[in-house]
Image (cartoon, rainbow, N blue to C red):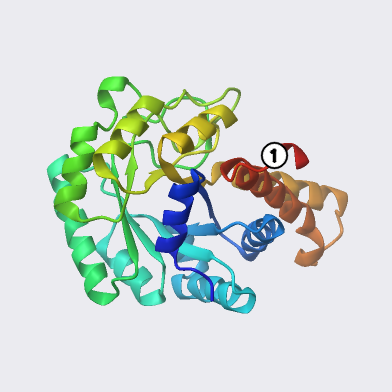
């Protein structure tokens, strides 16, 4: 029987590797992500944001992931990513998600603590096996290719999550995982890498909270930053914009190479291959495998 998410995260911590987390909006991306993970035999996480969950359907997303896990006895898990409303939390819990990220990062620290604690208490009362992740520090909200910094994003050292804040947040909320602002940003710049991550800050926060740390907004960061962040204590890395971009380029290529084709399954293969290539490269990097084989 496949291991549960808590065990997988503990094993990743012990090995100083990270579990790749990739969002989906359709079956093309899900199949590509799953095939990439199976190809190199590593655990993988699937995410749906509030918008993606509304589009795909939370029960449908949970059913698809559950079927893959059961049919292949494989460690694939589903996260309700950046869930901001209590109603959506309840929907994800009822659907059978493995993790809930409650995102109160735009709230005041006190309000974030209050609402996250309420989410933790509710989720654990329904199913103690579901992990709850909290977020401290605003890193932007859109997984997109951008030209400038998101307004209000924490990028200056004085705006990043402090170890003291992280420790207090974890103590008062009871979360299982923490997503801090450590120089990471949602989305990616069009023509340059994202700003460097604050590796010392990651290490200090990890020492303070002793919980799995989650790096959001991984698209656009350098390979070296990923390696150092994982060594410093990051256990889950989120990638979304990169696979969205690969999906779109593949779809455009499929349409242009088959201008008269109307069967979706004949148009999608290039989108599938594009997404799979990105995921495979990232998973090899996160798991200390040879990325040059991609």
Taking depth in this image into account, of 128 and 34 the one nearest to the observer is 128
x, y (%) of residue 245? 63, 42
Residue under pointer 1: 291
Q: In this rendering, is residue 117 above or below 56? A: above
Q: Secondary structure at mark 1?
A: helix
- Pick the front one: 121 or 3: 3
Instruction: Tell me which residue sits at (47%, 24%) in the image.
Output: 148
**Residue name at image x 21 percent, y 55 percent:** 116
Which quadrant would residue 105 be assigned to in this image? top left
Residue at figure coordinates x 28%, y 71% from the top left: 128
Outermost residue on the front side: it is 14
Q: Position of residue 221 (x, y in %)?
A: 53, 31
Residue displayed at 50% across by 37% down: 187
Q: 253 left or right of 119?
A: right
Where residue 68 sits, quadrant-wise, is: bottom right
Is there any visible trace of residue 198 in the rendered image? no
């Amino acid at each position: 029987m496949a291991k549960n998410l808590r065990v997988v995260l503990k094993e990743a911590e012990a090995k100083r590797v990270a579990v790749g987390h990739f969002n989906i909006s359709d079956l093309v991306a899900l199949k590509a992500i799953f095939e990439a993970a199976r190809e190199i035999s590593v655990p993988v996480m699937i995410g749906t944001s509030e918008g993606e969950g509304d589009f795909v359907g939370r029960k449908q997303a949970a059913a698809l992931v559950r079927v893959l896990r059961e049919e292949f006895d494989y460690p694939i898990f589903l996260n309700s990513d950046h869930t901001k409303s209590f109603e959506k939390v309840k929907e994800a819990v009822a659907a059978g998600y493995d993790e809930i990220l409650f995102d109160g990062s735009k709230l005041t620290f006190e309000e974030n603590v209050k609402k996250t604690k309420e989410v933790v208490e509710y989720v654990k009362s329904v199913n103690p096996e579901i992990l709850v992740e909290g977020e401290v520090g605003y890193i932007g909200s859109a997984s997109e290719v951008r030209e400038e910094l998101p307004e209000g994003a924490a990028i200056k050292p004085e705006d990043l999550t402090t170890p003291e804040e992280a420790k207090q947040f974890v103590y008062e909320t009871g979360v299982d995982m923490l997503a801090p602002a450590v120089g990471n940003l949602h989305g990616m710049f069009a023509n340059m890498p994202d700003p460097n991550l604050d590796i010392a800050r990651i290490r200090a926060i990890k020492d303070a909270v002793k919980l799995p740390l989650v790096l959001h907004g991984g698209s656009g960061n350098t390979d070296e930053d990923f390696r150092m962040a994982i060594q410093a204590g990051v256990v889950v890395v989120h990638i979304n914009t990169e696979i969205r971009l690969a999906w779109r380029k593949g779809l455009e290529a499929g349409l242009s190479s088959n201008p008269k084709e109307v069967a979706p399954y004949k148009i999608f293969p290039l989108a599938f291959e594009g997404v799979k290539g990105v995921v495979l490269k990232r998973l090899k990097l996160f798991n200390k495998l040879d990325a040059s084989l991609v």
